[in-house]
Image: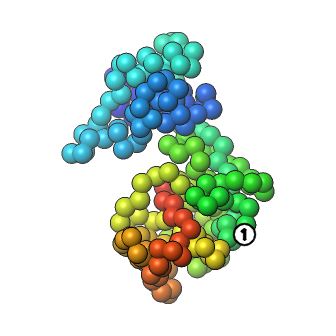
Amino acid sequence: MLTHAQIWNALDRLAARAGLSASGLAKRAGLDPTTFNRSKRITADGRARWPSTESVAKSLAATGTSIEEFVKLITDGTPAEQAVPLIGFAEAGSGGYFDDGGFPVGKGWDEIAFPAVEDEHAYALEISGDSMQPAYRDGAVIIVSPAAPIRRGDRVVVKTRDGEVMAKELRRKTTKTLELRSLNPEHEDRVLAAEEVLWVARIIWASQ
């Protein structure tokens, strides 16, 4: 019996094999870019939502993939992987690594293999030191998605206009301020004026 996870994993693998994110695959197939987003895989009441036969067929046609090949992607349990840019957290405040929207740019990035994520601009930061314990230990890697929607309670990376980069929990965001809770109880919470903030991006995964 096929499972919900197997089908979605096969679509993620199909996208990765074509060098695309899930949203990139949807666009290439002529579908709404959000068709394969993770938020679309579960209904509001928590039930599994399956991709439509039409969306799968269009994705196969767009990538030149046969049904037989897609079945192999379903039955192969190896997670789809893509290369994700990686730098040290301490380097993130330096100029040249991000544009003003928080998307990774420039040279100096290393790469790590990571299961395919929704955001083709996702990147990894390696934590150094113990300032973020107990949430993130020294050497931990966090995956950050500039395109992911952000809600109260999410862990985020914030960069200020003066170059400071921090990982915090979002307490509240208004048009005037950004309220942040420290991950380390020994550090104070922060309240930043909106004009101080260059960009905010959500942390979608962390190694443990």
Secondary structure beneath label 1? loop
Colour setup of the view = rainbow
Q: Percent position (x, y) of residue 133?
A: 53, 76
Q: Amino acid at mark 1?
A: Ser
State the residue in front, 61 or 5.
Answer: 61
Q: Percent position (x, y) of residue 142?
A: 57, 60
* On screen, residue 120 above or below 205: above
Q: Percent position (x, y) of residue 83?
A: 66, 43
**Label 1 crowd bin: few (<14), some (14–19), many (20+), radius 10 Å:** few
Q: Residue furthest left?
A: 45
Q: Quadrant of residue 104?
A: bottom right
Q: Residue at x 54, y 76 (%)?
A: 196
Number of residue marks: 1
Q: Indicate the quadrant containing the N terminus: top left, top right, bottom left or bottom right.
A: top left
The answer to whether residue 89 is left or right of residue 56 is right
State the residue in front, 34 or 49.
Answer: 34
User: Which residue is labeled 1 in the image?
Assistant: 94
